Image (spheres, rainbow, N blue to C red):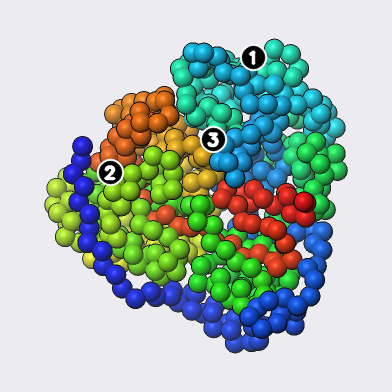
Amino acid sequence: MIQVRLAASRRRPRRRSGRDAAILAALTAGSIALAACGSGGETTEAAEEITTLRIDVLSEPSTLDPLSLNDTPAQRVYRMVYDSLFDWNEQTTEVEPQLADALPEVSADGLTYTVPLRDDVTWHSGETFTADDVLFTFEQVRDTDNSSVWASAVSAVADVAKTDDQTVTFTLNNPYTYFPEKLAMVPIVSAAAGYQPNDNLSRDMVGTGPFSFENWQAGEQIRLVRNETYYGGAPALEAIEFHVVPEDTTRVANLRNGTSHIAPELAPALLDLVRDSGQQAEVAAGNVTRVYLYPNMQDGRPTADAEVRQAIAWAVDRKAIIDTVYDGAARSASTYLSYGSRYHVEELGDFYGDGGDTTQAQSHLDEATTAPAEPLNFVVNNLPALVDAAAIIQQSLAAAGIQVEIEPMDFGAMVPRLLDQEYDLLLTTAPVSVTAGFAPDYPAIGLHSESVPNWNRFTDPQMDELLTAAQRAPAGDESAAAWRAVQEYDLVTLGQIQLVSAQYTEGFSKDLTGYTPSNLAWLHNVPTIGTD
């Protein structure tokens, strides 16, 4: 077991970034109160009926292919169009049937899952949904030539067979405690539509979900319309429009004046401005996003040296990021298995404390065999919060003797750099709920050597063994011990360098009565807006 050495907490007054300060000044220069608001921000008029829901997002997807990518911009759209065999119930935190007609029947040895399918589902193109579509989907996911982002989720599957048009049987190579949760992750695609990776479904969608695809105006908006024949009942909303609005100033103004209805990932410092105008804003504490660094693991790169990675992990001033960037709506993070996840160990998850420990960082640099001699190329996903965080990271590393040059990039341009390993450090985010649902085994997606989304090619046989054992361990004490071992070794190897766990923040219209931001990052509750 590793020795846990917690860095001393260094509390400081909360600061706002220059970007947030400018936004606050711009928005408070004019009248904050809207005509429809009374004192205290309470509305004095009845809620307006919303038929077309406008969502102002920071960036558009790079692809709509539901088998290719699981980043938030893409899932936020395609999860409205595609269904899976199962769905997550946010109240019970259990899976429940979606395209399946009931929970799976599991054999005594835990190797066979028999899934009955609904017989009242049609594709948006008019064809009938059958077991053939399920078989086709999992064939595409399991085909290594397709490099599906969901391949690791179903790596335990040995065979998928059709019993009849309404029954599918999955046979596993080994017991897998979290297999039903994995079936809730994989979107089912149409066999009739066919599939070519990042081709026919990258700019079009044919699903079975509550909304169907209408059009995508690149750089501007994506429009979905109501599926009138949805098997779960047609949604109350007639349409959903995702508008690309990268400026927080505009997103807040649009929300305040009623132009838009939802602003995901709103800067926490701006929530009170939304509330003061009579609109609504919440911090979804259960919707946690990992803010982390990919270190380049190629031989010869300084970041391939574990001692350099340790130095970086100790050097970063996490508290400054929490206070300045997230206005307190975050906490320090050290392990891939994040705070709030099942089997997360708090003393390990807070191993580096608030960070900013230059003494510890320099001691690890002294042990490094490939300490950085030149400034590191530091690629940053060009989102306002991450650019602000990158500046803090740059200052922190400089204090420890590591120089970096920041290169902000839009997500679409950043992905090829990540895949081609053209960086030293890369800063991005990943909502835990996107990859995890309610299962704790998402670290295998990023750390197992055979996982497709192990984007920085981290390879460690011992980590592979620990992850596999944890995925197979029965729920309870055995799983707790297995996942503790994963977290302990994660702190030794640092395949990814975790920085903070940020809580999801959202502004939304006062007219969305009964609406609650989801703990799942793809606006899971939006299709229910306007329904009883």
Quadrant containing the N terminus is top left
Q: Residues within 10 Å of mark 1 (few under 14, many from 20)?
A: some
Horizontal and vertical percent position of residue 303: 29, 47
The residue at which mark 3 appears reads as 149
Q: Sequence-wise, which precedes: disc 1 or disc 3?
A: 3
Q: Which residue shows up at 30% across the image and 63% down it?
A: 317
Residue 394 placement: quadrant: bottom left
Q: Sequence-wise, which precedes: disc 3 or disc 2?
A: 3
Residues under labels 3 and 2: Cα distance?
Answer: 25 Å
Residue 13 placement: quadrant: bottom left
Question: Tag 3, which secondary structure?
Answer: loop
Would residue 308 be seen by someone viewing this image from the given angle? no
Would residue 376 be seen by someone viewing this image from the given angle? yes
Residue type, label 1: Ala
Numbered disc total: 3
Give the left or right position of residue 211, taking residue 350 as reference. right
Query: As rendered, which of 181 and 55 lies closer to the eye?
Result: 181
Horizontal and vertical percent position of residue 411: 53, 53
Residue type, label 2: Leu
Residue 161 numbered mark, or none: 1
Q: Which residue shows up at 61% across the image and 78% down it?
A: 276
Cβ–Cβ under 8 Å for marks 2 and 1? no
Q: Which of marks 1 and 3 is in front?
A: 1
